[in-house]
Every structure is written in structure tokens, then in C-alpha cells.
Image (tube, rainbow, N blue to C red):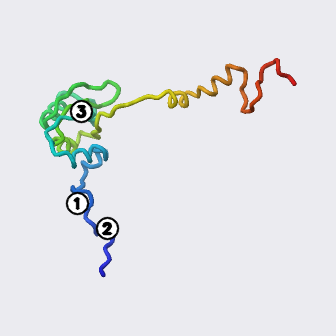
Amino acid sequence: MTRVEASQVSPVAVEGHKPDAKDSKIPSDLRSLIDTNQDRTRLHDVIVQMSERPGGAHRDMVKRHGGTTNHQFQSIDALFVRMPLAGVDALAAERRVVFITPDRKVRRTMAATAKLVGVDQLQKSASGDDDDDDDDDDDNNNG
């Protein structure tokens, strides 16, 4: 019986595609979408982070790969783009592209927000109970 070392296994056989530099620019959820979607012409919203402030040349580059720029972000060097899955790998291979991520839905929950701002600590402080015991630290409770 011949033993095969992990280093001898081709990434192509494992993942179904040959990894290269562009793969580090695409997150696993988008990679999975590209690899498993039969309709690669279907348009998807993605955020394309650039290595510099995007300008006309960057928008032209997106267009060459089948994309349409819908928005340029002001706070980050990125474009909001709608493009076919078939063009994502080629766009990722461009040297001025840093990262491409799908436009994910972001949801807030009050529990996460409360934890983030420390609502429980604020409530204790406002009620006069500022330590971690179960006693009310009100002035009327001196023993």
C-alpha cells in the first residue's frame, strides 16, 4: 500500500480549481458561489476593494470584465459593482484589485448592540447599583 502525503495531493483535485494569487482576493463564500453556480452569467453584487482611490481607469477595468459600477465608497477605496460570476476571477487577477467580497446582508440585533455598548453596566450605574453584588447600593440601604 502506497501512502500519499498531504503535500502530494493536488489542490485541483481537492477544491475543483487551481489556486493562484487571485484566490487570496476572493473569500470562501464567493469562491463557492463561483465554483458551484451553473449560470455564471447571472449578475451578483460585489464590493471591489482597490489598492488606491478608484477613478475612471478602475471603472473601465470593471467594465472590461463585464461589471457595472453602481457606487464609489467615500470612506474606503472600493467600488460597489454588479457583475457576472464569470468575470470575478479575471477581475481578481488585476494587480490593482485588493479584495472582492459579495455584498452581504448585515443585520443588527439589540442583544449584540447592548453588549457592545455595555447597556447592563449603564443600567447598574444609573440605578446606583455599581458593583457586582446583588445588593442595591442606594443611600437608603446602609445596613
Residue 51 visible from this viewpoint = no
Could you give the CA–CA distance between mark 3 and mark 2, rounded to whole angstroms?
36 Å
Q: Give the mark nearer the N terminus: 2 vs 1.
A: 2
Q: Name the element at disc 2.
A: helix
Residue at left 12%, top 36%? 64
Q: Is residue 42 above or below residue 126?
A: below
- The residue nearer to you, when weighing 89 against 61, is 89
- Residue 114 x/y as whole percent: 54, 27
Q: Is residue 45 above or below residue 95?
A: above
How would you rate the neighbour count of disc 2 (Cα within 10 Å): few for under 14, some for 14-19, many for 20 or more?
A: few
Mark 3 highlights which residue?
45
- Residue 119 x/y as whole percent: 59, 26
Kind of residue sitting beneath label 2:
Ser
- The residue nearer to you, when weighing 97 against 118, is 118
Residue at left 85%, top 22%? 142
Q: Quadrant of the N terminus?
A: bottom left
Total numbered badges shown on the rendered structure = 3
- Asked whether, in this view, residue 122 is left or right of residue 44, the answer is right
Residue 82 in which image quadrant: top left
Q: Give the mark nearer the N terminus: 3 vs 2.
A: 2
Kind of residue sitting beneath label 1:
Val
- Residue 37 x/y as whole percent: 20, 45
Comparing labels 3 and 2, the label whose residue is closer to the camera: 3
Mark 1 highlights which residue?
12
- In contact (CB < 8 Å): disc 1 and disc 3: no
- Asked whether, in this view, residue 73 is left or right of residue 69, the answer is right
Mark 2 highlights which residue?
7
Could you give the CA–CA distance between mark 1 and mark 3, rounded to whole angstroms?
27 Å
Residue at left 82%, top 18%? 140
Residue 15 in which image quadrant: bottom left
Could you give the CA–CA distance between mark 2 and mark 1, rounded to whole angstroms?
13 Å
